[in-house]
Amino acid sequence: MPDQKAKAILNDIGTEELAHLEMVGTIVHQLTKGASIEEIEKAGLGAYYTDHGVDVYPQAASGTPFTASYIACKGDVIANLQEDLAAEQKARATYEKLIDLCRDEPDVVDPLRFLREREVVHFQRFGEALRGVQDKLAEKKFYLNDTLVNNNASILSTNDNNCNCK
């Protein structure tokens, strides 16, 4: 990462995203805590219960478990930041759909709205990082020839030495 500010932004957002996982897991845990087997089956969670009980297990709504393949990294800072921007928009859209599904549950909707707002802020921060990195990469670079600099320094030091000291 060519820019220290961008590194700090990535660190801040990454830390906050881990907290988002914890918040979503807590919501799921609170919603399923004390649910009977009949309630779990009626909610369509029978297969999930069979594999995981009532533990929180990170997976997509389709049941696909989270894998590292969801993390898009290309080895190019611009491409990676573009992927981060897209991920934030996808997360925002997912929270909006969850809010629609839970509209009658204010205790669920309020934290989901907070999380959606944070995704918007993350999108803005990733945009800020992208602009900073692009500006940094667009700067002109100046290179000095060490040999020339050293030769000039030697010439100056011998010319300035008028005391005939060794």
Image: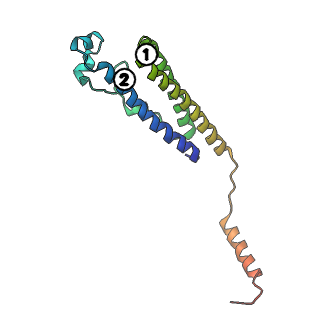
Residue 100 percent coordinates (x, y)? 46, 13
Q: Is residue 33 visible?
A: yes
Q: Earlier in the sequence, mark 1 or mark 2?
A: 2
Q: Amino acid at mark 1?
A: Pro
Q: Which residue is mark 2?
A: 27
- Asked if residue 153 lies left or right of residue 113, the reply is right
Q: Is residue 59 visible?
A: no
Q: Quadrant of the C terminus?
A: bottom right
Residue sitting at 22 percent across and 20 percent down? 50
| Number of the label disc, if any, that sits on residue 106 | 1
Task: Give the CA distance from mark 1 to mark 2.
Answer: 12 Å
| Image position, residue 52 (x, y; %) | 25, 24
89 or 83, which is in the foreground? 89
Q: Residues within 10 Å of mark 1 (few under 14, many from 20)?
A: few
Residue 67 location, quadrant: top left
Q: Position of residue 158 (x, y in %)?
A: 73, 81
Label 2 Cα crowd, 10 Å radius (few <14 / some 14-19 / many 20+): some
- As helix, strand or loop, the secondary structure at mark 2 comes to helix
- Assign a secondary structure to mark 1: helix
Q: Is residue 163 above or below residue 126?
A: below
Q: Nearer the viewer, mark 1 or mark 2?
A: 1
Q: Amino acid at mark 2?
A: Ile
Check the picture and name the quadrant holding the N terminus.
top right
Residue at 26% over, 11% down: 39
